[in-house]
């Protein structure tokens, strides 16, 4: 079974940057949607950024202008460049990939901690 492998999380001071990556362990076809979610302690998981197959991008309002989502179609990899990080960005970040064949894949999560 194909899994999503995430990397790039860590501890950073406020104002710093991190880049998350998410790549599949095997072949995925007909990707419709690639996105990043996050979950802070005691809070529900929320959508941070998404890019569709057609290149349409949406961001959570609180990260607009600071985060950039991008994808490498040849590698089926999605990235999240996070700049000007704030303590409220702290949480576990999850990659999500959905296909037109109804696959709904999640990564294992990567911890992002922003210290004040």
Image (cartoon, helix red, strand yellow):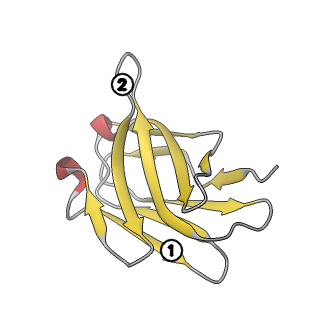
Mark 2 vs 1: CB contact within 8 A: no
Residue lying farthest bottom?
74
Q: Is residue 109 above or below residue 78?
A: above
> Which image quarter is the C terminus in?
top left
Which residue in the structure is indicated by mark 1?
Answer: 71
Which residue in the structure is indicated by mark 2?
Answer: 44
Quadrant of residue 67 within the rendered picture:
bottom left
Question: Residue 60, percent across and down?
Answer: 24, 50
Q: Is residue 72 above or below residue 8?
A: below
User: Which secondary structure, mark 1?
Assistant: strand
Instruction: Measure the C-alpha gap from mark 2 to mark 1.
Output: 25 Å
Residue lying farthest left?
61
Report the side of 59 relative to 93 (left or right). Answer: left
Going 27% across and 62% down the picture, which residue do you hit? Answer: 58
Local packing at callout 2 (Cα closer than 10 Å; few below 14, some 14-19, many 20+) is few
Report the side of 95 relative to 113 (left or right). Answer: right
Res 34 label: none
Question: Residue 66, percent across and down?
Answer: 26, 61
Residue lying farthest top?
42
Q: How many numbered callouts? A: 2
Quadrant of residue 64 within the rendered picture:
bottom left
Local packing at callout 1 (Cα closer than 10 Å; few below 14, some 14-19, many 20+) is many
Going 82% across and 49% down the picture, which residue do you hit? Answer: 1
User: Which secondary structure, mark 2?
Assistant: loop
Q: Nearer the viewer, residue 27 or 11?
A: 27
Report the side of 22 relative to 114 (left or right). Answer: right
Question: Residue 87, percent across and down?
Answer: 31, 37
Going 35% across and 45% down the picture, which residue do you hit? Answer: 47
Going 50% across and 74% down the picture, which residue do you hit? Answer: 71
Question: Residue 37, percent across and down?
Answer: 42, 44
Residue lying farthest front?
101
Disc on the earlier residue, 2 or 1: 2
């Amino acid at each position: 079974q194909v899994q999503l492998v995430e990397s790039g999380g860590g501890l950073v001071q406020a104002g710093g940057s991190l880049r998350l990556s998410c790549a599949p362990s095997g072949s995925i076809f007909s990707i419709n949607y690639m996105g990043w979610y996050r979950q802070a302690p005691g809070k529900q998981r929320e959508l941070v950024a998404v890019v569709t197959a057609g290149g349409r991008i949406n961001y959570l309002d609180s990260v607009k202008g600071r985060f950039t989502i991008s994808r490498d179609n040849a590698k089926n990899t999605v990235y999240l460049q996070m700049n000007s990080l704030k303590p409220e960005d702290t949480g576990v970040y999850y990659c999500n990939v959905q296909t037109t064949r109804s696959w709904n894949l999640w990564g294992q999560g990567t911890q992002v901690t922003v210290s004040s």
